[in-house]
Image (cartoon, rainbow, N blue to C red):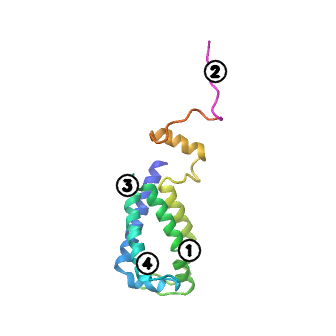
Amino acid sequence: METWRRRLRYALAAIYLFIGVVHLVATDAMLPLMPDWVPQPRLVILATGLCEIAGAIGLVTGRFRRAAALGLALYAVCVYPANLKHAFDHVHVDGIPDSWWYHGPRLAFQPVFVWAALWAGGLIDWPFGGGRRSAEAATEISGDPARPPKGPGPDAPATIREP
């Protein structure tokens, strides 16, 4: 499972790095996507580009992985209004299709990006983990000194010792 988590981390990092660079180099092309209530939309686009790049880098580093995963998940939630405006206001952006064949899957997939960032960053185990007990077992295996291994849980089989 850890192999898939690592692969997803690298895939997300590549996607967010690419999108972050696009935010920085094609800022003006993205301005029409910004909802009217967003203050200083140009600055917001540039800031989100930098955040995407920082998140991509953080996602592949051990020290910042969890913070980056949380940041990218929150980012995916925060940009949803721009995605909705793009779809429902039929905003044309060169190089991006303006059809529901594009917008439908994009809008439906946004929650998957939230989950993917959280799972790849190790913040959640759902649906592959067995809940809290499985997370504890993973910590015991990893040898994280911040969380020492615990004894057997209430569901552990009893051991019978011969006298």
Which residue is labeled 1 in the image? 107
* Amino acid carrying mark 4 in the image: Val
* Amino acid carrying mark 3 in the image: Thr
Of callouts 3 and 4, the N-terminal one: 4
Q: Residue 84 lies in what quarter of the image?
A: bottom right
Q: CA distance from mark 3 to mark 4?
A: 25 Å
Q: CA distance from mark 2 to mark 3?
A: 44 Å
- What number is the disc on residue 61? 3
Q: Residue at x 38, y 56 (%)?
A: 60
Q: Residue at x 40, y 74 (%)?
A: 47
Badge 2 crowding class, 10 Å Cα cut-off, few under 14, some 14 to 19, many 20 or more, is few
Q: Could you tell me which secondary element the residue under label 4 belongs to?
A: helix
Q: CA distance from mark 2 to mark 4?
A: 64 Å
Contact flag, marks 4 and 1 (Cβ < 8 Å): no
Q: Residue at x 51, y 69 (%)?
A: 76
Rendered position, 138 above or below 103: above
Contact flag, marks 1 and 3 (Cβ < 8 Å): no
Of callouts 1 and 2, the N-terminal one: 1
Numbered disc in front, either 2 or 3: 3
Q: Residue furthest front?
A: 39
Which residue is labeled 4 in the image? 44
Coordinates of residue 95 in the picture (x, y in percent) = 41, 82
Coordinates of residue 90 in the picture (x, y in percent) = 53, 87
* Amino acid carrying mark 2 in the image: Ile
Q: Residue 30 lies in what quarter of the image?
A: bottom left
**Which range of residues does the magenta coloring cover?**
154-163
Q: CA distance from mark 1 to mark 3?
A: 29 Å
For this rendering, which residue is in front, 108 or 66?
66
Magenta stretch holds residue 72: no
Which residue is labeled 2 in the image? 160
